[in-house]
Image (cartoon, helix red, strand yellow):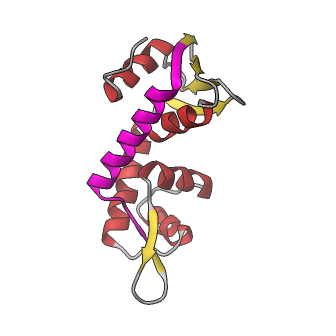
Amino acid sequence: MKERLIRLKLVRNLIKTHRIESQESLLECLQKEGYPVTQATLSRDLKTLKVGKVPDGEGGYIYSLPGEEERQEMTRTYIHDFLRGYISIEFSGSMVVIKTYSGHSDSVALAIDNLGLDDVLGTIAGRDNTVFAVLREGITGRDFINRMKESIPELEE
């Protein structure tokens, strides 16, 4: 996990200091820095960092990081979506089941995926009212709830 955080910081720095036009060129920059990663890993990193493409003024596009204000607004939206949709959280070991109001499973899963919780490997939204989250090895459901409470102080168990 520590390596991932260092890599995310490096990706952020590369985007801030270079004109990055494609994932291929970003992969090359990472390799030059000693971080060979797969395209799939880089795609997940870009999603985590909420990287977008903006016009470069020359007819092309370059990667750009969201501003702090935009990032805070997105986080508030995800928190609101989670709080509006969840009913309860139960867990067994490293598996978490989140019951949601009917029709809210997608937005609750998306919120968890986008809140930047490194403890979560991934989520699966049920068709209607359940989200299943798988946690990293060594992370318990209690750890997950505690981490969620750090991100969402209003969260009630």
The residue closer to the viewer here, 138 or 58, is 58
Picture coordinates of residue 105, whole percent (x, y): 61, 30
Q: Can residue 116 be seen by looking at this rendering?
A: no
Q: Residue at x 46, y 64 (%)?
A: 52
Residue at far right of view? 127
Q: Residue at x 65, y 31 (%)?
A: 125
Number of disc labels: 0
Q: Residue at x 58, y 23 (%)?
A: 101
The residue closer to the viewer here, 29 or 81, is 81
The magenta-colored residue range is 63-89
- Main SS, magenta residues: helix
Identify the image quadrant of residue 30. Answer: bottom left
Magenta highlight on residue 1: no
Magenta highlight on residue 82: yes
Quadrant the N terminus occupies: top left
Picture coordinates of residue 60, whole percent (x, y): 49, 84
Q: Residue at x 52, y 30 (%)?
A: 120
| Residue 1, placed above or below residue 39 | above
